[in-house]
Image (cartoon, rainbow, N blue to C red):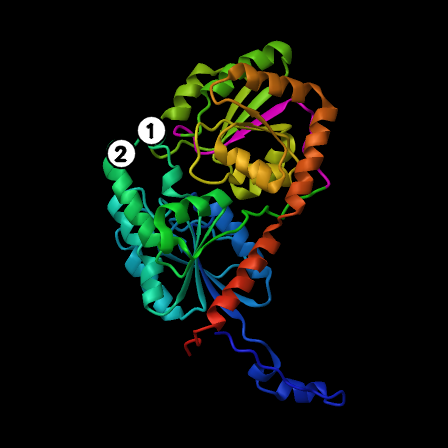
């Protein structure tokens, strides 16, 4: 437990006398947090979310932060963070490496920012890494998981799983393992409900906490101030995020708005390595559709400021949408498929979203034509989404996490010296 030390100082005590006091008498011990996450310049799963968690933690004077991140091959590190690159994607030794670092640092909190495939896509390697939160707890650390996906929401057909029955057994076992951490936070209320219904007492330490919106933006620039003809689609493409319906709708949009353009940002999903390349061939030589590839964090502001509308062409989802939250912070109108996760985010967080059925390209094109043709329509939705973003800033979300951590570790635990 981080100790609090208070010195009762009278008004006539000099600054020199205060400076001479032991540090423990003049300051509150900082909460030592190990954040386990993929982290830029890595392109690993959830690296952007990990970066913004770290920004809020680093800005908090009550926190002493160390990031246990994935290896990047010696790429230039972000400045201002204490980072230890101690694990590698798909390595079978990640559990051992992480546990050694945790034992060495003796933290107050080990906070995992993960999904089921954050550490590995290979099943054995992924399973071994998922033992770390429970093993850390057994070793006496307080371990907390922010779990971005739950297995029960994964559409195995969309994910391209070859042996779905075996995968279901493995996924259920992996979820039991994750629930052995001290506490688990999920990002939608229905995720908590599903876990409690499926795993009973195992899920009693699951809480819902909002995703939060990132704050490193210029709010003076809003989506409706863009030139009004740019559609943005963003993601890892080829599994449950697909572009065929959007590209078909784009043909209809161009027939009504010839100067419209579609920007496709992001890369292939690892399970579909040639997906984007096949689509690029079909649209080669047509400037109305541009494939931008991976967009680093530093280049996101100009990209979102350029866009007029964001499209989320999902066929399913196993978690909440980070891109949807980014659209809110930039004041972008959103057009998305009417899947349960998108609908729940819109209702829970008061986000304005135009919905269409996943296969209905005509409905999608109608939404896009209406929004691209009307500054007022975009302005109205933009203002609603900026308001929604302002109600859930990342600093507030992280502050609530930290308050919860302090309450949890203050009860039965005494911090190791």
Residue 311 image offset from top left, x and y in percent:
55, 27
Q: Earlier in the sequence, mark 1 or mark 2?
A: 1
Give the SS element for disc 2: helix
Vertical position of residue 360 compared to residue 20: above or below: above
Q: Residue 341's spot in the image, x, y percent?
A: 49, 36
Residue that badge 2 annotates: 164
Using a 10 Å C-alpha cutoff, classify the residue at mark 2 as few (fewer than 14 neighbours), some (14 to 19) or many (20 or more). some
Where is 33 relative to 239, above or below?
A: below
Circles 1, 2 touching at the beta carbon (< 8 Å): yes
Q: Which residue is drawn at the image coordinates 60% and 66% (left, top)?
A: 61
CA gap, disc 1 to disc 2? 8 Å
Q: Quadrant of the C terminus?
A: bottom left
Identify the residue at horizontal 44%, vertical 20% (top origin): 280
Q: Is residue 348 magenta?
A: no
Is residue 318 toward the left or the right of residue 250 in the image? left
**Mark 1 residue element:** loop
User: Is residue 62 depicted above or below 218 in this figure?
Assistant: below
At a point 63% along the width and 11% down the height, the residue shown is: 256
Q: Is residue 224 magenta?
A: yes
Where does residue 241 sit, x and y in percent of width and height? 44, 29
The residue that mark 1 highlights is 157
Q: Does residue 300 appear in this view?
A: no
Residue 137, by quadrant, is bottom left
**What is the magenta range?**
220-239
Q: Residue at x 45, y 50 (%)?
A: 39
């Amino acid at each position: 437990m981080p100790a609090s030390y208070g010195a009762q100082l009278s008004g006539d005590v000099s600054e020199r006398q205060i400076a001479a006091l032991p540090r423990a008498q003049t300051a509150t011990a900082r909460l030592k947090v190990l954040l386990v996450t993929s982290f830029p310049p890595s392109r690993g799963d959830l690296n952007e979310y990990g970066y913004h968690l770290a920004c809020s933690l680093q800005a908090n004077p009550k926190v002493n932060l160390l990031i246990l991140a994935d290896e990047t091959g010696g790429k230039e590190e972000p400045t201002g963070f204490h980072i230890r690159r101690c694990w590698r994607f798909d390595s079978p030794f990640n559990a051992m490496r992480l546990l050694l670092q945790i034992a060495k640092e003796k933290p107050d909190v080990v906070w995992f920012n993960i999904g089921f495939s954050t550490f590995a896509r290979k099943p054995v390697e992924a399973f071994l890494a998922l033992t770390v939160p429970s093993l850390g707890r057994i070793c006496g650390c307080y371990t907390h998981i922010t779990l971005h996906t739950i297995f029960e929401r994964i559409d195995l057909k969309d994910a391209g799983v070859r042996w779905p029955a075996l995968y279901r057994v493995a996924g259920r076992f992996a979820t039991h393992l994750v629930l052995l951490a001290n506490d688990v936070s999920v990002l939608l209320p229905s995720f908590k409900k599903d876990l409690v219904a499926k795993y009973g007492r195992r899920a009693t330490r699951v809480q819902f906490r909002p995703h939060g919106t990132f704050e490193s933006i210029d709010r003076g620039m809003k989506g409706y101030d863009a030139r009004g003809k740019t559609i943005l689609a963003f993601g890892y493409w080829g599994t449950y995020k697909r572009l065929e319906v959007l590209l078909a709708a784009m043909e209809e949009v161009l027939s009504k708005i010839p100067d419209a353009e579609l920007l496709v940002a992001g890369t292939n999903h690892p399970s579909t390595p040639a997906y984007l390349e096949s689509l690029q061939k079909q649209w080669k030589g047509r400037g109305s559709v541009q494939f931008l590839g991976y967009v680093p964090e530093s280049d996101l502001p100009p990209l979102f400021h350029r866009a007029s509308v964001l499209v989320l062409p999902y066929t399913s989802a196993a978690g909440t949408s980070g891109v949807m939250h980014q659209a809110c912070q930039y004041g972008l109108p959103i057009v998305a498929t009417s899947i349960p996760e998108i609908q729940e985010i819109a209702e829970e967080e008061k986000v304005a979203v135009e919905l269409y059925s996943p296969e209905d390209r005509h409905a999608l094109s109608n939404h896009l034509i209406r929004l691209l043709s009307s500054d007022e329509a975009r302005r109205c939705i933009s203002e609603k989404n900026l308001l929604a973003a302002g109600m859930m800033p990342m600093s507030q979300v992280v502050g609530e996490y930290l308050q919860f951590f302090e309450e949890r570790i203050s009860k039965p635990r005494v911090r190791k010296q």
